[in-house]
Image (cartoon, grey):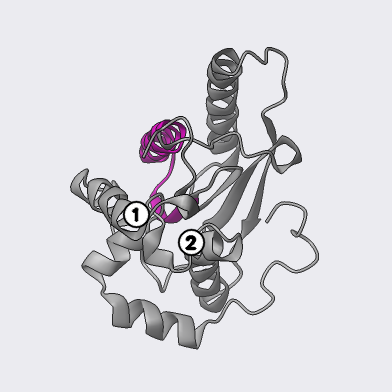
Amino acid sequence: MTADMYRYRKLTEEQQRHVVQERQHRGFPMHSPPHLDAPNGFRIVTGTCFEHRSILQTTNRLTEFEDQLLGLLTETTHECAAWCVLPNHYHILVKVASIEILTTRLGKLHGRTAFEWNGEDSERGRTVWYRCQDRVMRSDAHYCTTLNYIHNNPVKHGLTARWQDWPFSSVHWYLKEKGREWLMENWREYPVLNYGLGWDDFIF
């Protein structure tokens, strides 16, 4: 596996297991367990690459961006319940006191990474990030469905066949701390179905 040509779905099963084990060994996630009965203040926040270009296409970029994103969330949120970083966008489910502070910090993160990646790719002036959008959780059901949606995102976009095979996601914390049966029960009770259809198709 080479970092420069990395695309997770093209790895062998053995390579995929190695990547997942390495992510788990590093101790993700960094945040405390979520309070599933307290949706107030939680929202899904999504950042998207311009024109859905897969600019985070290498192992290094996915790893480094996830590291920086989680560090930022430690400083700016009360709680991070779920996240997933993909080659062209990311989702986070967070509880914040100020969405303005969070989006300002995310904007600075976008600016830093865009400058770095454009230099690496010899593409100065390229627009890397398109926008950051958020949506408040309306209920416990909305919260739980959103958690499932975030974990299912790599499957939805054809990056992997199973949630647990994508390394850059909070699903590994849930598998370790809650167990597979807990995740499956949550999925059965709160299926994604047509979640996001219409208002957020252009991002998700």
Whether the magenta-drawn stretch holds residue 75 is answered as yes
Amino acid type of the residue tagged 1 in the rendering: Gln
Of residues 106 and 149, the one nearer the viewer is: 149
Residue 147: x, y in percent? Answer: 48, 66
From the image, tell me which residue sits under label 1.
16
Where 152 sits versus 110, above or below? below
Q: Give the extent of the magenta segment.
A: 60-84
Q: Which residue is mark 2?
A: 160
99 sits to left or right of 67: right
- Helix, strand or loop for the magenta stretch, by majority: helix
Residue 135, percent across and down? 65, 56
Q: Quadrant of the C terminus?
A: bottom right
Q: Residue 80 placed where, x, y %?
A: 40, 52
Looking at numbered disc 2 in the image, what kind of residue is underneath it? Thr
Q: Is residue 51 above or below residue 43?
A: above
Residue sitting farthest toward the right: 198
